[in-house]
Amino acid sequence: MRIGLSTSVVQRGKTGVAQHLFAVLRALLARPGEFHFVLFVLEEDLPLFEFAKKAAAIVPVSERFRAPVKNILWHQTQLPRLCRAQELDVLHVPSYRRMLWPKPCPLVATIHDLAPFRVAKKYDPARMFYGRVVARMLSRRQDAIIAVSDNTARDVTSFFGVPPERITVIHNGVDHERFVPGDREKAKAEAARRYELQKPFFLYVARLEHPGKNHVPLISAFEEFKAATHSDWQLAFGGSDWHGAEVIHAAIERSPFRSDIRCLGFVPDTQLPELYRAADVFVYPSLYEGFGMPPIEAMACGCPVISSTRGSLGEVVGGAAATIEPNDIHSMARELYILATDSGARNRLRAAGMAQAQKFDWNRNAAETLRVYERACVKSRKPMASTVRECV
């Protein structure tokens, strides 16, 4: 079975979609069976796929097609031709932003969230229009859609009008070889050396995006917490600047506690587990998520979590996190206070979180993804031998 994967949505590896794609691809390439993968990769992203070179065919894509509009046009005009030349049995596009209209072979798309319908002004007007109107039409051309949560699946049916029988929910996984509890003292020493986090600290890992990721209310809650406790706790933001980042930076500059707020920039995937281990509490106040990988990764590393329940977050964190209403600054400040002052509460959440994280596994995700490819081929009446193994 020849499976194509479009990878241009990785955006130089600095997004949650990128980490999802890298993780599921590693799991797919490790599975037994007659599966041959063809990866379409922008030239400057080629080093990110070094791990796949021996197990997959890689087709370089010119950098002139990186810009969003040109990349969309490449998907609609050049990629169908490449699919036919590669004799693909199925093409998987892991984001609704690049779904195909032409059908050179059976089409599978992953939809992570439908945030343009849920968060006002999440993107600029052009991207909002594309997400609300164009993607809706393209979604109906797909033979199968993978949704990363039940919440996203419901949104795809409600907003895109895709019938439930064409949608398969496959939860994201956790790399349980890397995201594990470890030596906290060593992790804290590394955080102090690398990021000047010498005191206990709250950690939030998400791109600096306003208003969707809700950094500014968290800053306000942190200020309320600091004013009430006079504690030495710090607040650390790990993530690249994104749409609206200037608003977040301005809020930090205005803060009377700005010396205790750190912007760490993009944290490489190799450094994330150690940072989660170093953090005393992980906070995730996002206004909307289609899944929300960082809270589960933090839980797997033994870090207690405070989380919004918006979108799929309630589904993902279950009862293993202290939950907040992300627009209620006082509620958020209260949870910061409780977790900062009550070691017993932290320990209870730490144990519950590690158990919750075990429910998410990339090997299971890969096995279920391969079954979606098979069903898409059958639906398109393209015969092939069934080689998909059972989940491990």
Image (cartoon, helix red, strand yellow):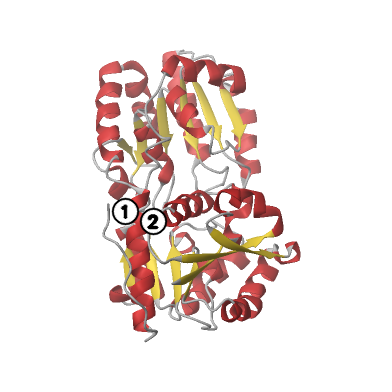
Examine the rendered structure and indicate whether residue 347 appears above or below residue 59. Answer: above
Q: Which residue is mark 1?
A: 364
Disc 1: CA contacts within 10 A as few (<14), some (14-19) or many (>=20): many
Q: Position of residue 162 (x, y in %)?
A: 36, 76
Q: Is residue 91 something that shows in the picture?
A: yes
Q: Position of residue 170 (x, y in %)?
A: 33, 59
In terms of image quadrants, where is residue 352? top left
Q: Secondary structure at mark 2?
A: loop
Q: Nearer the viewer, residue 210 or 373?
A: 373
Spatial distance from mark 2 to mark 1, Cα to Cα? 11 Å
Kind of residue sitting beneath label 2: Arg
Please give the name of the residue rendered at 24% of the width and 25% of the height, measured from the top-left corner: 348
Please give the name of the residue rendered at 29% of the width and 34% of the height, measured from the top-left corner: 353
Q: Earlier in the sequence, mark 2 or mark 1?
A: 2
Q: Nearer the viewer, residue 59 or 8?
A: 59
Which tag is nearer the camera, tag 2 or tag 1?
2
Q: Position of residue 243 (x, y in %)?
A: 62, 50
In terms of image quadrants, where is residue 347? top left
Image quarter hosting the N terminus:
bottom left
Residue 31 disc label:
2
Q: Residue furthest bottom?
A: 381
Kind of residue sitting beneath label 1: Arg
Please give the name of the residue rendered at 49% of the width and 77% of the height, measured from the top-left corner: 138
Q: Is residue 154 something that shows in the picture?
A: no
